[in-house]
Amino acid sequence: MRPFLRKKIRLSEGTRARALAFLLVALSSGALGFLAVLHLDQTALFDRLTGYQWWIVTASALGGVIALFLSGDRLGQTGLNGTFRAAAGGLWVTFVGALIGGTLGLPLYGTMFGPFIVCVTLLGTPVLLMLWIVNLTGIHILLGIYQRERDSIFTPARMTMPDHPDSLTVRLRGRFT
């Protein structure tokens, strides 16, 4: 983002990272939707896309964005536990996004075939699967920036100071009075 836009819009680094994560998932989900359209109709690459095919691509992008929003804080956590949560969040974004996009694209049938087509597309092309995993890793890193900024805002300074008497609850300090 240009410096003059950064001053005008006044977004923090974490908010910009979160917006970029949502943009990345929208673009990559839309690209997966486009590949699903190509998988179903190979002539769509050389001909113009019909309105319905454009809707499938748009619904795929919307499904990915909604799934990322619904994933909550599964992505962006630190540590070993955060890695396991990120793997679960990646699966969530992939399959719930396909479920939502398929439902938007073709109600009832798309609900069933959306995740199926995404699974066949990703497993049929290992390079595409690796790109999808790298994309989800980048989204995890971007949401980690957002989470750290959010934690620094909502965590009192006394909670982060080592050996501060109020840094632990009474029960954990060993005093029950």
Image: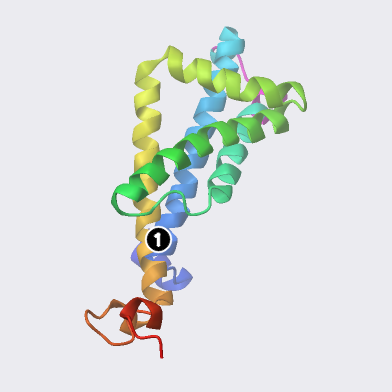
Rendering coords of residue 132 (x, y %): 40, 30
Query: Could you tell me which secondary element the residue under label 1 belongs to?
Result: helix
The N terminus: image quadrant: bottom left
Report the residue marked by disc 1.
Answer: 146
Q: Residue at x 40, y 61 (%)?
A: 147
Rendering coords of residue 63 (x, y %): 61, 38
**Is 79 rendered above or below residue 36?**
below
Rendering coords of residue 171 (x, y %): 39, 79
**For the view shown, which residue lies furthest in the bottom direction?**
177
Say whether residue 4 is visible. no
**Is 118 rendered above or below residue 4?**
above
Q: Residue at x 74, y 25 (%)?
A: 106
Left or right, 93 with reference to 49: left
Q: Residues within 10 Å of mark 1 (few under 14, many from 20)?
A: many
The C terminus: image quadrant: bottom left
Rendering coords of residue 62 (x, y %): 61, 40
Q: Which contiguous range is marked in magenta? A: 46-55
**For the view shown, which residue lies furthest in the left direction?**
162
Taking depth in this image into account, of 164 and 140 the one nearest to the observer is 164
